[in-house]
Amino acid sequence: MALLSLVAEEPMHAYRMQQMIKERRKDDVVNVAQRNSVYQTIDRLLRDGLIAVRETLREEGRPERTVYELTAAGREALRRWLRTMLSAPAREFPEFPAALAFLPVLRPDEVRAALEERLASLEERSAALDADLAEGAAFLPRLFLVESEYRQVVTAAELDYVRGLVADLREGRLGWDYEL
């Protein structure tokens, strides 16, 4: 979806797609850490007829770059995927709830220590999101910040929950005297 969205804006080559995702800080919601994953996705989109090769550029001193453009089928697929993703909650399997489901594998003190580490990470993430939102609001319309707003709200909710869980462990309102 991310790559289709970019070529919907304008035809571009793979390296530019990866750059734009990072420049726009979309790499927090789209995994493009490995350049190879972008190329693999492009191969699938080409194979499925959702993008097409527009041209191949050969600039002196630079590697050959293939520029891709969106096809009509790609535009329709992008719009359909986005409508579906917005309207229907996906059945996802995040790691944290899975870990919570198996707390008795560890001792309560181990769980509390791990959750306290998580709190520190969540507080850092929350502060970074606050800074990103403030910085972005200075030059971007809100439309381009809504996913960061969402992540901030979700992070705040998780912070509240984990703080409560740590307090319950600390005060003995949650505990067990066995390990699995």
Image (tube, helix red, strand yellow):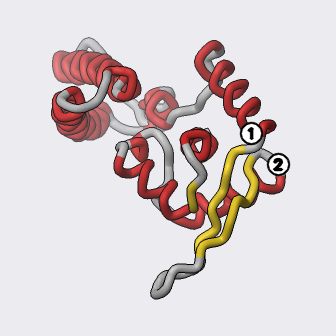
Is residue 29 something that shows in the picture? yes
Q: Residue at x 65, y 15 (%)?
A: 88
Indicate left or right for 32 with 71 as reference.
Answer: left
Picture quadrant where residue 141 is located: top left
Is residue 109 something that shows in the picture? no
Image coordinates for residue 12, horizontal then vertical, percent: 57, 56
Q: Which mark is residue 137?
A: none
Q: What's the distance in space between the residues labelled 1 and 2, CA to CA?
A: 7 Å
Q: Secondary structure at mark 1?
A: helix
Indicate left or right for 20 with 50 as reference.
Answer: left
Q: How many marks?
A: 2
Query: In the rendered structure, which amino acid carries the disc numbered 2?
Result: Gly
Q: Residue at x 59, y 60 (%)?
A: 37
Q: Seen from this angle, which residue lies furthest bottom?
A: 61
Q: Residue at x 52, y 80 (%)?
A: 59
Query: In the rendered structure, which amino acid carries the disc numbered 1?
Result: Gly
119 vs 125, nearest the viewer: 125
Picture quadrant where residue 82 is located: top right
Compared with 154, 56 (above or below) is below
Q: Tell me, yes or no, whether the two marked residues, 1 and 2, touch with CB atoms within 8 Å.
A: yes
Indicate left or right for 60 with 165 as reference.
Answer: right
67 vs 100, nearest the viewer: 67
Q: Residue at x 60, y 52 (%)?
A: 11
Q: Earlier in the sequence, mark 1 or mark 2?
A: 2
The residue wearing badge 1 is 74
Q: Which mark is residue 49?
A: 2
142 vs 54, nearest the viewer: 54
Image coordinates for residue 100, horizontal then vertical, percent: 44, 28
Image coordinates for residue 41, horizontal then vertical, percent: 67, 55
Q: Secondary structure at mark 2?
A: loop
Which class describes the residues within 10 Å of circle 2: few (<14), some (14-19), or many (20+)? some
Indicate left or right for 25 with 128 as reference.
Answer: right
